[in-house]
Amino acid sequence: MVKPDLKVRIGALELKNPVTMASGTFGSSGEEYKGLIDINRLGAIVTKSITLKAREGNPPPRLVETSSGMLNSIGIQNDGVDSFIKDKLPFLEKLRTAVIVSIAGHCVEDYVRLAAKLDKVKRVDAIEINISCPNVRGGLEFSKEPDSAAGVVEAVRKSTRKPVITKLSPNVKDISEIALAAQKAGTDAVSLVNTFTGMAIDIDSRMPVLGNVVGGLSGPAIKPIALRMVWETSKKVKVPIIGIGGIMDYKDALEFIIAGASAVQVGTANFVNPSAAIEIIDGIEKYMRGKKIKKIKELTGCLKT
Amino acid sequence: MVKPDLKVRIGALELKNPVTMASGTFGSSGEEYKGLIDINRLGAIVTKSITLKAREGNPPPRLVETSSGMLNSIGIQNDGVDSFIKDKLPFLEKLRTAVIVSIAGHCVEDYVRLAAKLDKVKRVDAIEINISCPNVRGGLEFSKEPDSAAGVVEAVRKSTRKPVITKLSPNVKDISEIALAAQKAGTDAVSLVNTFTGMAIDIDSRMPVLGNVVGGLSGPAIKPIALRMVWETSKKVKVPIIGIGGIMDYKDALEFIIAGASAVQVGTANFVNPSAAIEIIDGIEKYMRGKKIKKIKELTGCLKT
Amino acid sequence: MKQAKGKILSNEEAKPGYYLMAVKCPPVARAAKPGQFLTVRCGNATEPLLRRPFGFHRINGDAFYILYKVLGKGTKALSSMKAGGAIDILGPLGNGFPDPKGKKDIVIVAGGIGVAPLAALAEKLSKDGKKDISVIIGARDGKSLLCREHFEGLGIKTMVATDDGSCGKKCFATDVLEELIAVRRPFIPVIYACGPGPMIKAVAHVAKKRGLEAYGSFEERIACGVGACLGCAIKTRSGYKLVCKDGPVFSLKEMIW
Amino acid sequence: MKQAKGKILSNEEAKPGYYLMAVKCPPVARAAKPGQFLTVRCGNATEPLLRRPFGFHRINGDAFYILYKVLGKGTKALSSMKAGGAIDILGPLGNGFPDPKGKKDIVIVAGGIGVAPLAALAEKLSKDGKKDISVIIGARDGKSLLCREHFEGLGIKTMVATDDGSCGKKCFATDVLEELIAVRRPFIPVIYACGPGPMIKAVAHVAKKRGLEAYGSFEERIACGVGACLGCAIKTRSGYKLVCKDGPVFSLKEMIW
Ligand SMILES: Cc1cc2nc3c(=O)[nH]c(=O)nc-3n(C[C@H](O)[C@H](O)[C@H](O)COP(=O)(O)OP(=O)(O)OC[C@H]3O[C@@H](n4cnc5c(N)ncnc54)[C@H](O)[C@@H]3O)c2cc1C
Ligand SMILES: Cc1cc2nc3c(=O)[nH]c(=O)nc-3n(C[C@H](O)[C@H](O)[C@H](O)COP(=O)(O)OP(=O)(O)OC[C@H]3O[C@@H](n4cnc5c(N)ncnc54)[C@H](O)[C@@H]3O)c2cc1C
Ligand SMILES: Cc1cc2nc3c(=O)[nH]c(=O)nc-3n(C[C@H](O)[C@H](O)[C@H](O)COP(=O)(O)O)c2cc1C
Ligand SMILES: Cc1cc2nc3c(=O)[nH]c(=O)nc-3n(C[C@H](O)[C@H](O)[C@H](O)COP(=O)(O)O)c2cc1C
Ligand code: FES
Ligand code: FES
């Protein structure tokens, strides 16, 4: 049988396969993983969210493990967009995979200026709007209401010709509503989900374990909820969906694709097993061969209910 | 040191300790666990949600295990309130623990009639309003908006003199908003959380694993989110909070209490280890002795942030 | 029904992919009947979370055996447990195989790992000397054929059917059943079956055609195991029944396919 | 830095609650320097989820040792792994202990399990014969005292302090340090420390008072281990640094208490 076709489209952007790295879990350029995996095999990488000015991030501890999951409260530590362009681009230039840059801000104006700056950078293939980070005041709020979400998307849409992906928060009543609003506002795709706001308490000190009190829950624990959200959203929107949440192996990835995702992002799994994403690509290809599926597109949204 | 005082108050109702059994996880009367544990040691039991008319429930499979959690789509299978009163009361009469009866309906009128019928039953110590079951159409919707939630609570409040506990859904943007509305509407306490709507897919058949497509996620996987919701709600409402979500041992229970819960409900843990609730009671008492805490009330909401 | 700590007496691979575990646990073993089941906790992490259900494969005195197929994480964890260790047991659960009453002739039809609980049944029935028992075992191939020696050791005539003919006849267990019933007349046996859905369905079909009394042991996902969660519902002519409480053994007449 | 399958050569309890594991893993062992660390996957379930970090306790050729304290689920799972089995290793990670350069005198201060990475350091430093090395080990009691024989085997003078005086002096390791510095003049050693926070803080205090060069190995919760998640931030005079990438060894002057 001929090699299965894993190519997928996210708006104008074509990825060699649907497996990409989730923002904040693969470094600010992926350079940290250089020696560990062949980054060029990935469909794309999404870089750590950047802001206009540098952010030092939240006080430690920033991590705590929970049952089949983890809480993080990094707080979008980053050196700001200008240093990103200066320091990270040289490495990104060398990669032969799509580069999606994640941006975060406190107000619409922040997003606009970030998008405008990145619009001029050739190596940036697409922009992911992080309006859903539970670890910074402001950020999360945008994705809580259809209007505020649409506001950011519309403004960013106007300030760049690059494909725009809107990343949604699961901490809402109906995520498909927000996705629909983002679509109306002109996003080329939606990615879901970001982390669930959670917390952990040390019963001896009677204090929160995280320096920031609350953090974002990620990992296998959230997969069933994230998968349901992708499925619900896929019934409402036409734009491509990038599925995220607890994807650890090719089976998890396929569940998201069958539920309606065109591509997936691998996050926490990178910490557990740096080779996870590569193994997922191989696993999907093997599955397609076994089932004689020629194009991955045939699988997207093929769930029989 | 004298025996620590574990007594807690839920409105007019006093419980001998804060450890209670969650609706749907301890049978429709607890009789199934008769031979296994000493039910009379529990603070209370919450019976399986009952409806006006019998419901046969959802098609199988109704269960699937997920990472540190499980999905269920029982669909409130029950024989209806009249059979409940006829068949289950004899056993409940014999118990020396508080009996909280959970009710579910499709419209406000259902809840009103259920509450009115139960109001006449002496053995019923309190009523828990389940407006948050993801497995029946209608049910979940009430807890999605402050107004609809308040509507049910108000109506039930008018139809019974028994303590009323409102059980909230976590599938919302801001659960403390709903809790506040329920408080305004006259609920004596709020219990949170019910299950998170989730799903699982069989990648070979490309069909949902559950007969009902989606189900409710419970177990340790959801604990960090449930704990955060209890903490957020405790900052907003004055009525007692009953913490629920992935409580497997006394440490988990104490995290909820420190976050602001006056009592807790043990659900999925009953399946994993039928003795869990009893071990939790013993564990809390041991912790209090070790820390020289006289009254459990001192612990509720003592989180230092 | 009790939750008790059992002591693992042995835990060895019986056939590739199949393990036999002996557990000493008086309160459970003493009360167990063939066809009933137990649940075990496969480790004490939250993963795997739920207890796993297994039939009583052999029951003797203070101890019992389970025969299990290594499928996923739970059975994998179970297979790595060492003799001498402790294990958390809940049981006996559900109802056993109903007594054949006066009936003299018994046919036991086992498919794959479905043979596990039927071994205990055969052992019990063969004790009262008056029964005429035939066992039909179906398996993928000779390598995965289970318990033949056990039945023959009980002096029970045992017929084998394998998918690839590598052992016994190359056909389905139910083909052997049809034949057996066809040749022996008058022959009005009680049939007990456990195995894959399609096999039990075929047995039900044969039983219906011949008007024979037949029982099968069924599976559903189990959470509580005691009838409390209503999670193991299975469709029957009289509505949903619970595999863990009303079953796992049901009269085949009752079932809907 | 590589992710590689290692082979467990041995895994035994060194002292009650402490295990010593030898792993053959050429790509990691060959590149490892004292003070660096590795992460291991404690099983392949999703629980425990994250890899667990451990320092290189001894490095020789294709193999290395880790010495670990059984604390929670990860180390518990690790302690049950058998020799001959495979284990998923990621390393070497972080930076090792900086070279003392020209300095001749070395003092190593270890508290509890903190002795683990310092053993590798002592072994390396003692190889170049020109160093004068003193080791101070602090422990709860004699039973939980680790590695004394190891250091003495290297011909290093080893002083012991225990909380209960059941072995060596009844005081803190840092009291021994103060004394040592007080009696030996002129004495301008480089100090390397690893242990509980309060101990390292006390070492930093002594070093500051005497104007001595001192390094400590620090801990934070680790997720990626490679500097990608920014989860292991620790406060220093020059802002947040990453324990996994900038550390785990830091100059004590740099730290904020
Ligand atoms: C009443 C009853 C008696 C059984 N007796 C035996 C026996 O004697 N020997 C034997 O080998 N097997 C028996 N089984 C099946 C056995 O319980 C499953 O194979 C086992 O639970 C699989 O667990 P796992 O973690 O290895 O597989 P998983 O990875 O959890 O799942 C593999 C498959 O096993 C099934 N399964 C998983 N969890 C459960 C559960 N809690 N309840 C039921 N099925 C489940 C599902 O179909 C799942 O797809 C019995 C099942 C039931 C309901
Ligand atoms: C750079 C570094 C080197 C280390 N070297 C050693 C060593 O040589 N020998 C040794 O015994 N221990 C060492 N540790 C500590 C060791 O990693 C923890 O004791 C271990 O991870 C506990 O895991 P657990 O599952 O048994 O405990 P858990 O039940 O997970 O947690 C128990 C406690 O261990 C700590 N811990 C848990 N997970 C992590 C993690 N991912 N990273 C850091 N701390 C964690 C937390 O404080 C937690 O409260 C080192 C830690 C770091 C950061
Ligand atoms: C340590 C950490 C840092 C993260 N940082 C970001 C971030 O900067 N921007 C963002 O959009 N998402 C961030 N995320 C969320 C992930 O991109 C992803 O949405 C989430 O972890 C769920 O996927 P997973 O379960 O596969 O990890 C972060 C997640 C983790 C664990
Ligand atoms: C099998 C099952 C059935 C349930 N049925 C009900 C129900 O009838 N009414 C209700 O209010 N909650 C029901 N729940 C939700 C639980 O009461 C509880 O809110 C939820 O499981 C979270 O707690 P846990 O993580 O401790 O299980 C059910 C949960 C499970 C697992
Ligand atoms: S498994 Fe809970 S009712 Fe059968
Ligand atoms: S653990 Fe990820 S940056 Fe250090």
Image (spheres, coloured by chain):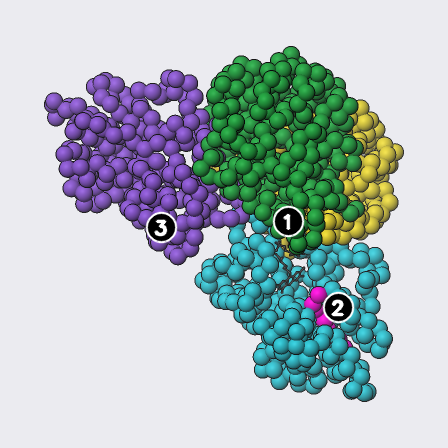
Chain colours: A yellow, B green, C purple, D cyan
Picture layout, residue B89 above or below residue D235: above
Kindly identify which numbered label has been placed on residue B3: 1
| Residue on which the image places disc 2 | D200
Tag in front: 1 or 2: 1
Residue C70 position within the rendered picture, expressed as x and y whole percent measured from the top left: 39, 44
Crowding near pointer 2: few (<14 within 10 Å), some, many (20+)?
A: many
Which residue is rendered at x = 41% and y = 30% of the image? C245
Circle 3 — which element? Answer: strand
**Where's the N terminus of chain B, which quadrant?**
bottom right
Q: Are marks 3 and 1 on the same chain?
A: no
Q: Amino acid at mark 1?
A: Lys
Which residue is rendered at x = 24% and y = 23% of the image? C213
Chain identifier of the residue bearing label 2 in the image: D
Mark 3 touching mark 2, by CB under 8 A? no
Picture layout, residue D192 above or below residue C223: below
Residue B150 position within the rendered picture, expressed as x and y whole percent measured from the top left: 73, 20
Tell whether A261 sits left or right of D192.
left
Circle 1 — which element? Answer: loop
Tag in front: 3 or 2: 3
Mark 3 touching mark 1, by CB under 8 A? no
- Visible residue check, residue A222: no
Front in this rendered view, residue A167 or C114 = C114
| Residue on which the image places disc 3 | C24
Front in this rendered view, residue C232 or A193 = C232
Which residue is rendered at x = 34% and y = 40% of the image? C31
- Magenta-drawn segment: D190-196
Q: Amino acid at mark 3?
A: Lys
Q: Are marks 3 and 2 on the same chain?
A: no
